[in-house]
Image (cartoon, helix red, strand yellow):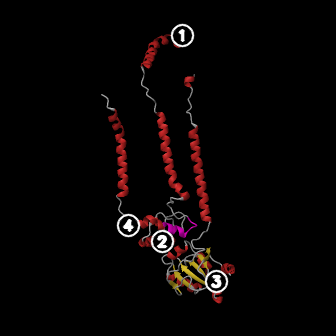
Amino acid sequence: MSASPSRSAVARWAPWVALLLVVVVALAVGTLAQDDPTDAERAQSIAETIRCPSCKSQAVASSDTPSSKAVRQLIADRIEAGDTDEEIRDYVASRFPDQDLLLDPSGSGFSALVWALPAMFVVAAVAGLAIRFAGYRTPGLAATDADRRLVEEAMDDEPDRGEDGPEDRA
Amino acid sequence: MSDDAVVEPRRSNAVRWTALGVGAVMVLLVVLLIVSKQADEGSGASAVVGKQAPALAGDALIGQPFDVGTNDRWLVVNFFATWCAPCVQEHPELRKLAEDGAKDGSIQVVSVAYDDEASEVEDFFRERGGDWTVLDSDDGRTALDWGVAKVPESFVVAPNGLVVERLQGGVRAREVEDLIAASTEQGS
């Protein structure tokens, strides 16, 4: 007994819908259920995205140089004064225009490519795979009556051909 | 015979061109990254040169509290630390600059101690001479406002409060005097 077309479509899409639901719910819980960070957490998070002005590549959060200590103090003062994270980061970066202090690349200009390129590559890869896999789908290959007749004839002919085969002639 | 022939997988031109395109983009990005980084590092740009000097808000460790724009002399703002060898080396030059400037009243030197102890600064000046004002860095805030991350570093400030020049590393008295003379001539 075969399932109706609508029931088979539901059965085929149900796992994908369930998967999508799980992903959406997980993302929603992960992003919306977070409490507002404390000032100390904000300060730590900002300090992790600013490079120590007198080091090569260490973040001010993990550096004990005088300049890093000064930046950490500045971050704390500015948070207390009500500045946003972006305002604080921009101010520190503006003090050292000859250095690239922001470890988290900005979303504008040339740095925006850092964010845009991976997304573009993922989209292109998924599109490429989809196009490739679509080509693998073969049209219905069910054997026709003519195919079956051909096979039967070939099977019938097989013993005769065996008698005339190269081994017998030899 | 033809049944045994190895069938080579056909590689489409699209795949080849895509691979070449991705490779070319990657090479371009690496080149751009290197070039832009070198341009940034080689610029020597300063946050304060050509602008009004930021405040000198630190407490006075030696001398009287002081801020920019309180007199009509050229100002040399020197960031230093007692633990920094190049700062020790430049000290005689700063002394000469302060003494020459005091004679004709044209130049004043002010130092800002960078991540240092008040007692160390007092000992430093007692041993090596110099009687100009020394301020603390206000928890590093003053240094940040001036864009200073390493010492020694000095700034030449015009009497109108405009920062004229940034001098990274130890200063030379003659160099600073010539610079001020040239800037004064340009301004007059």
Callout 4 and callout 3 share a chain = no
Q: Disc 3 and disc 2: Cα gap in Å?
A: 32 Å
Q: Which mark is on residue A69?
A: 2
Q: Position of residue B114 (x, y in %)?
A: 53, 77
Does the magenta run of residues contain A92?
yes
- Residue A19, image x and y in percent? 36, 45
- Mark 1 against mark 2, which lies toward the viewer? 2
- The residue indicated by pointer 3 is B97
Magenta segment? A89-99
Q: Is residue A136 visible?
A: yes
Most prominent secondary structure in the magenta stretch? Answer: helix
Circle 4 sits on which residue? A38
- Is residue A53 among what the camera can see? no
The residue type indicated by label 2 comes to Lys
Q: What is the chain identity of the residue bearing mark 1?
A: A
The residue at the point 53 percent across, 63 percent down is: A57
The lab-note entry on whether marks 3 and 2 share a chain reads no
- SS label for mark 3: helix
- How many discs appear? 4
* Kind of residue at disc 4: Thr
x, y percent for residue B160: 60, 81
- Could you tell me the amino acid type at mark 1? Arg
Residue A169 image label: 1
